[in-house]
Amino acid sequence: MPRRIASVALVVRDYDEALAFYRDALGFDVLADTDLGEGKRWVEVAPSGGGTSLVLAEATNPTQLAAVGDQAGGRVFLFLETDDFARDHAAMLAKGVTFLERPRREAYGIVAVFADLYGNRWDLIEPRSESDR
């Protein structure tokens, strides 16, 4: 199998609130929610359709808590691709997701920045198709 990034750890304040956001607001699938003992869990989510998963890692010390919502220093951290920007944008708005800008067309596709429940910035993007180029 070729090498790939299988998962990315995302530091969160609370397992359950993060799980609810990614499952309910973004429509991600819950791949795992396993009790590891001593208050730790393995919580893994991913967009339906596959791709890289997020391991929701609950902060356990002041340094980790300080990183919640700012894992990329205020830059866009993650990129959520879709095959239908209008559909997903409308669904996310209806579920209370905060978009930080209006959708815009760029050379690479339709995009808008949104924030997760902690403030991490994401791009929702529908890449240009080959026929659009």
Image: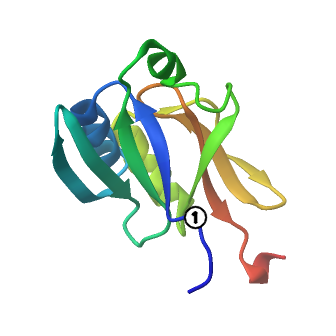
Looking at the image, residue 91 sits to the left or right of residue 76; the answer is left
* Quarter of the figure with residue 17: top left
The percent coordinates of residue 69 (x first, y second) are 51, 25
In the picture, the quarter occupied by the C terminus is bottom right
* Quarter of the figure with residue 21: top left
Instruction: Give me the residue at 67% from left, 25% from top.
Output: 74
Picture layout, residue 5 above or below residue 75: below
* Quarter of the figure with residue 70: top right
In the picture, the quarter occupied by the N terminus is bottom right
Instruction: Give me the residue at 68% from left, 25% from top.
Output: 73
Instruction: Give me the residue at 67% from left, 38% from top.
Output: 76
**For mark 1, does the 10 Å Cα neighbourhood hold few (<14), some (14 to 19), or many (20 or more) residues?**
few
Looking at the image, residue 48 sits to the left or right of residue 42; the answer is right
Q: Amino acid at mark 1?
A: Ile
Give the mark count.
1
The percent coordinates of residue 27 (x first, y second) are 33, 54
Q: In the image as oriented, which residue stretches furthest toward the front?
A: 38
The percent coordinates of residue 128 (x first, y second) are 73, 69
The residue beneath circle 1 is 5
Q: In the image as oriented, which residue stretches furthest toward the top?
A: 62
Instruction: Give me the residue at 43% from left, 71% from top.
Output: 50
Seen from the viewer's position, the closer of residues 41 and 27 is 41
The colour mode here is: rainbow
* SS for callout 1: loop
Looking at the image, residue 114 sits to the left or right of residue 9; the answer is right
Q: In the image as oriented, which residue stretches furthest toward the bottom?
A: 1
Picture layout, residue 82 above or below residue 21: below
Seen from the viewer's position, the closer of residues 40 and 94 is 40
Picture layout, residue 35 above or below residue 2: above
